[in-house]
Image (spheres, rainbow, N blue to C red):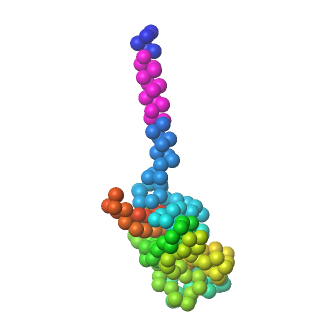
Amino acid sequence: MARLRRVLTALCIAALCLGAAACGKENDESIQGVGTPGEAFREGLAEEMNGLTYNVFITRQLNTRIPPDSAFYRGPDPGKKDTLYGVFVQVCNEGKKAEEAVKPDKFVIKDAQENEFRPLTLPRDNVFAYKARPVNPKECIPLAGSVAQQNSAAGALLVYKIPIDNLEYRPLELEIEGGFDVRRRAPDKLRYELDF
């Protein structure tokens, strides 16, 4: 009986240790988010990277034949095999010093087949376009009160041309590459799963 009690006690302790370890991992930032292979963040969640907070507000296909999409993008029609996809992001600095925002080409959409799509270059006069710049404390991209901030998506726009066939390779994820993490010897990254 004493031996059975010792075995049961040992099993209970082992189960408690495993449970505590699992709980620790669930809340550990290394499981999700910056520079990890864990699950991607959901749209609408603000996540910090290198002093700036990034938020993907909304993502959707654009139809440039109707407003407001005709104002968002004034480039060539994507054709029958491709679609235009808009990603509306906000980048804010809650810190005490100006921080450099990630350049547009560091916002990469990847499908489940590891195909990569970079944003199209939008004209400088496009008031909705995401433009990287130093972000001062308590400031955001897009600026408060700007046309981009006041539109229904409330974010700065990145536009991607994606083959329609690739929309089947879900989930699509937006990967935002920031600075370089010397400790891990890899770029800092945030990943968001995109809604369709």
Out of 172 and 192, give the one closest to the viewer: 192
x then y, percent, for residue 61: 57, 75
In depth, the one of 87 and 125 nearer the eye is 125
Residue 61 visible here:
no
Q: Position of residue 67 (x, y in %)?
A: 66, 84
| Residue at x 45%, y 20% (from the top left corner) | 8
Residue 155 in the magenta stretch? The answer is: no
Which residue is outermost to the top?
1
Q: Residue at x 62, y 82 (%)?
A: 69
Most extreme residue toward the front is 96
Single out the residue that lies furthest toward the left: 185
116, 49: nearer the viewer: 49
Work out whether 73 lies above or below 186.
Answer: below
Q: Where is residue 118 shown, x and y percent of the image?
A: 44, 76
Region in magenta: 6-19
What is the quadrant of residue 44 in the picture? Answer: bottom right
User: Relative to 178, is 158 on the left or the right?
Assistant: right
Between residue 132 and residue 136, name the one nearer to us: 136
Q: Residue at x 46, y 45 (%)?
A: 25
The quarter of the image holding the N terminus is top left
* Image coordinates for residue 167, horizontal then vertical, percent: 49, 69
Drawn side of residue 42 relative to residue 68, left or right: left
Can residue 102 be seen here? Answer: yes
Q: Quadrant of residue 181?
A: bottom left
Residue 8 highlighted magenta (yes or no): yes
Q: How many marks?
A: 0
Question: Quadrant location of the C terminus?
Answer: bottom right
